[in-house]
């Protein structure tokens, strides 16, 4: 059987659970604030608590791979378990790995996150296109086969990103727009939503590009980074209904109490609904 595409699954999850992605970012400082040691035991306790609190409630959970990788194989084992448990509870898992390479190496990354037989198989993964959009083909093809998604960096919120993403391509388009146009081509004809998404920072103000890619728009920066749900229409315009706002510390700082995590996530989801309801 052909798997249901990620875009369709994401649209359903956002409509039923609320348009929110919560990051699982076990910073050392966050572990400390939870009263946990910065070690594998603390990592496991933190991750298990977040999954228990939120996997049955939010549309998307987004583990940041680097914070697990720093503990080596034991950290990856915690990540593998979290991915499986979160997906079993109904959350879509977006692996925030930002992989980008060429040829067989990109193919290996695709096999890691987008092959259903992999212990790290996720519903979607973040990738970087700045070795050329064509370098992503192994990931795009693997995602199509498994019904997974790919979120491509377009306009990130870090100030350094502009020197690459706002640079002018050979045909005069901003490089970010060139990448967005590639994404739109990949999503052409998909309904209700394509499976190739863009990462566009919620802190950018007016994005200044055409975001009508017929795919999801992951919007980091809500909460601790300064953006609010009310800012979303100004950044994303007519595409705002396809935005997946991503919150990490704004929710995680309310742990380790499970009810605190749930209340914070629910509050953000309600605020996002209110901000985009008239669009």
Image: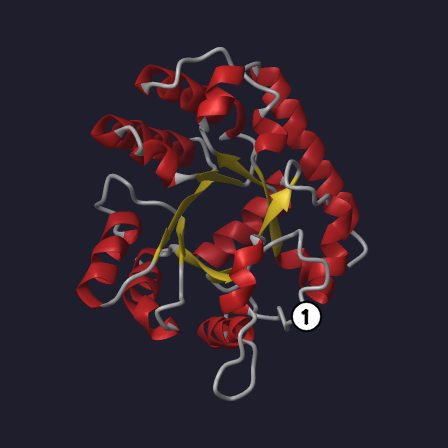
User: Which of 87 and 244 lies nearest the eye of the viewer?
Assistant: 244
Residue ID at (47%, 75%):
182
Q: Is residue 270 visible?
A: yes
| Screen quadrant of the C terminus | bottom right
Judged left or right of residue 140, residue 177 is right
Q: Position of residue 193 (x, y in %)?
A: 54, 62
Q: Position of residue 212 (x, y in %)?
A: 62, 71
Disc 1 marks which residue?
208
In the orientation shown, which residue stands out farthest toward the top?
Answer: 35
Q: How many marks?
A: 1
Assign a secondary structure to mark 1: loop
Judged left or right of residue 130, residue 120 is left
In the orientation shown, which residue stands out farthest toward the left?
Answer: 104
Residue ID at (20%, 60%):
105
Q: Position of residue 208 (x, y in %)?
A: 68, 70
In the orientation shown, which residue stands out farthest toward the bottom?
Answer: 171
How packed mark 1 is, by other alpha carbons closer than 10 Å (few <14, some 14-19, many 20 or more), is few
User: Which of 66 and 3 lies nearest the eye of the viewer?
Assistant: 66
Relative to 46, say whether 77 is above or below.
below
| Screen quadrant of the N terminus | bottom left
């Amino acid at each position: 059987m052909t798997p249901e595409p990620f875009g369709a699954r994401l649209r359903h999850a956002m409509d039923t659970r609320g348009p929110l992605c919560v990051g699982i970012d076990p910073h050392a400082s966050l572990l400390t604030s939870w009263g946990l040691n910065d070690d594998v035991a603390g990592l496991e306790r933190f991750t298990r608590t977040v999954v228990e609190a939120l996997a049955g409630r939010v549309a998307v959970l987004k583990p940041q791979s680097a914070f697990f990788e720093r503990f080596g194989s034991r950290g990856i084992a915690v990540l593998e378990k979290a991915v499986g448990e979160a997906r079993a509870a109904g959350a879509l898992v977006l692996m925030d790995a930002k992989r980008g390479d060429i040829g067989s190496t990109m193919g290996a990354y695709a096999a890691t996150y987008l092959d259903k037989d992999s212990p790290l198989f996720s519903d979607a993964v973040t990738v970087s296109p700045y070795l050329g959009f064509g370098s992503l083909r192994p990931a795009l093809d693997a995602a199509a086969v498994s019904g997974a998604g790919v979120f491509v960096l377009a306009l990130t919120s870090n100030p350094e990103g502009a020197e690459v993403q706002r640079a002018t391509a050979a045909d005069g388009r901003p490089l970010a727009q060139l990448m967005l146009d590639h994404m739109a081509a990949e999503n052409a004809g998909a309904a209700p939503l394509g499976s190739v998404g863009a990462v566009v920072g919620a802190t950018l103000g007016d994005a200044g590009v055409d975001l009508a890619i017929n795919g999801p728009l992951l919007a980091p920066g809500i909460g601790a980074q300064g953006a609010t749900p009310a800012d979303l229409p100004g950044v994303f315009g007519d595409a705002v209904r396809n935005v997946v706002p991503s919150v990490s510390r704004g929710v995680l700082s309310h742990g380790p109490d499970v009810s605190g995590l749930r209340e914070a996530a629910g509050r953000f989801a309600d605020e996002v609904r209110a901000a985009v309801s008239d669009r």
